[in-house]
Amino acid sequence: MPQPNLTGLDANGGLHTGLPTDFGVPLRKIFMVNFAQLAAPTNVKLGPVFPNGTVITNALLEVITAFTDDGTGTAKIGIGLNTSVDVLAAAAVSGAPFSTTGTKACLPVGSAATAVAKLTTGDTQLTFDRDDTATKIMVGGLMQVIVDFYVVPV
């Protein structure tokens, strides 16, 4: 069984490129998402690139500043790898998980039954589906996204 690369060096002793070279090794990506990045009512790809063969095993949100809307309707956010909602189902920013600060669970919760696999061609970023219109406008929020995953050969 191959040993995981824990040194930060690639197989040739050079600096690790940041892309996984050891299939099946647990990896983690952490990045910030703020309201300004979700400034248009559309699907927005944000954060680091996940390679083809990614299997997300766990995902958490750390809401630092609660997301809010202007009160004229219900703005929503969904998060996904293959679709806009396979990591976190679309939820109103006026309710859980976006309306209060703290750590929030997403759909992948460390089991095979909830894992999200990207086995199609091409690398991608997570999609943040901001569902709002002129009658329901998001006005603020800041969160950190923590994603645990591994990569399988495809």
Image: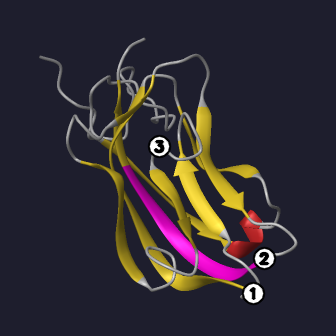
Q: Residue furthest left?
A: 1
Q: CA distance from mark 2 to mark 3?
A: 23 Å
* Residue type highlighted by circle 1: Asp
Q: Residue furthest top?
A: 154
Closer to us: 141 or 9 = 141
Percent across and percent down for residue 44 are 72, 51
- Residue 90 lies, with reference to residue 84, above or below; the image says below
- At x 71% / y 88%, what residue is drawn? 71
Q: Which residue is mark 1?
A: 70
Numbered disc 3: secondary structure: loop
- Write the start and end of the magenta stretch as one range: 136-147
Crowd class of label 1 (few under 14; some 14 to 19; many from 20; radius 10 Å): some
**Circle number at residue 42:** none
Closer to us: 14 or 123 = 123
Percent across and percent down for residue 55 are 37, 32
Report if residue 146 lies within the magenta region. yes
Q: Which residue is mark 2?
A: 137
* Residue type highlighted by circle 3: Asp
- At x 45% / y 35%, what residue is drawn? 16
Is 27 on the left or on the right of 45, as rendered? Answer: left
Q: Earlier in the sequence, mark 2 or mark 3?
A: 3
Tell me, yes or no, whether the two marked residues, 2 and 1, touch with CB atoms within 8 Å: yes
Q: Which residue is mark 3?
A: 86
Is 105 on the left or on the right of 130, as rendered? Answer: left
Q: Residue furthest right?
A: 134
Q: Earlier in the sequence, mark 3 or mark 1?
A: 1
- At x 42% / y 73%, what residue is drawn? 62
Is 96 on the left or on the right of 80, as rendered? Answer: left
Report if residue 41 lies within the magenta region. no
Q: Earlier in the sequence, mark 2 or mark 1?
A: 1
Closer to us: 126 or 51 = 126
